[in-house]
Amino acid sequence: MRHLMNPLDFTVDELERLMQLADDIEKDPEKYSHLCDGKILATCFYEPSTRTRLSFESAMIRLGGQVLGFASADSSSAAKGESVSDTIRIISCYADICAIRHPKEGAALVAASKSSIPVINAGDGGHQHPTQTLTDLMTIHALKGSFDNITIGLCGDLKFGRTVHSLVNALVRYKNVKFVFISPTELKIPGYIKEDVLVKNNAEFEEVSRLEDVMGKLDILYMTRVQRERFFNEEDYVRLKDYYILNKEKMALAKKDMMVLHPLPRVNEISVEVDSDSRAKYFEQVQYGVYIRMALILTLLELV
Ligand code: NCD
């Protein structure tokens, strides 16, 4: 039995196969619409979510399966003090596969260690968010064709942004990917990502604080929200929340074929005027998230 905790749980070849499968699902969804007949997906979300939970549910329903779950800790027995380990044992009796989101780093791993069904980490605190990374990779693959030789700028909350951590982990495995980390000093990429992931893989990277200075060299700009819920005090959040606002003026400095991605939800970091720019791909990204999650469910349930 396989779980997904971290994008590195799949080899580069396995990821390629997953993306090919997602691509085929996009082209011929009918072919896949009954592969999960009789199967149940549980979504156990202890933290807010719109896209991740609903895209998992949509993915399972489109495969012919059914879904059950909870959307907040206070509507589950966590509110009565039940541990994640106990909850997953119970869920294993009700469902065939489970996607879990939890505010604590490592919670999904704890669940996987006690589970008798495949567990998917749908976000564990400020640590990892592998299925967002699958979505991001699928989007880059579909719209750029390859991951090699790209310069990607990651901008905003690089400290608490789990989507950034997972994406960096995944991208260092491709050829000549250059990383530009754009953040205020307080929200820099964590030291463990620099040492254990970037330096270890000989990845080229730089850290800057002004987006304007690097805009012209980026092939992809990955914008992120300042993660209010992970701040220790509101004052720091208020000071940093509007540090970056991508607008038309900044877009004018970018390459004609640059691509703007964002895991969403967007707060203020991308002005709505950018939405109509053909380089803004964050709403397309959402659609790819459904196909890749369909491919993931089929793969973990060993139905393909
Ligand atoms: C992200 C997350 O939950 O980490 N959202 C998502 O799943 N698309 C990004 C965020 O909340 O800022």
Image: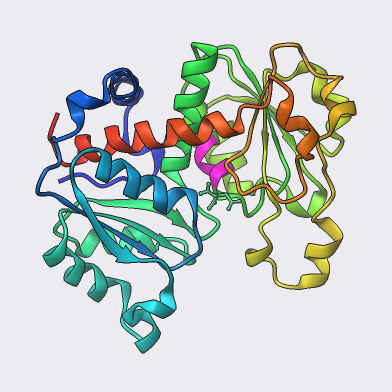
Tell me if I can see residue 128 in this picture: no
Q: Give the range drawn in magenta.
A: 163-167
Query: Looking at the picture, how far across and down is residue 208, in whole percent?
Result: 81, 35
Image x and y of residue 266, in percent: 67, 47
Residue drawn at point x = 28 percent, y = 32 percent: 295
> Predominant secondary structure in magenta?
helix
| Side of 54 where 149 appears, left or right | right
Total numbered labels: 0
- Say which of 71 and 193 sits in front: 71
Q: Is residue 195 visible?
A: yes
Q: Which of 106 and 292 is in front in this view?
A: 292
Residue 300: x and y in percent read 20, 40
Residue for point 55% across, 57% down = 126
Q: In the image, is 163 to the left or to the right of 259?
A: left
Q: In this view, does 112 lie to the left or right of 225?
A: left
Magenta-drawn stretch contains 245: no
**If the image is split into quadrants, where does the C terminus sit?**
top left
Asked if residue 5 lies left or right of residue 265, the reply is left
Which one is in front, 294 or 162?
Answer: 294
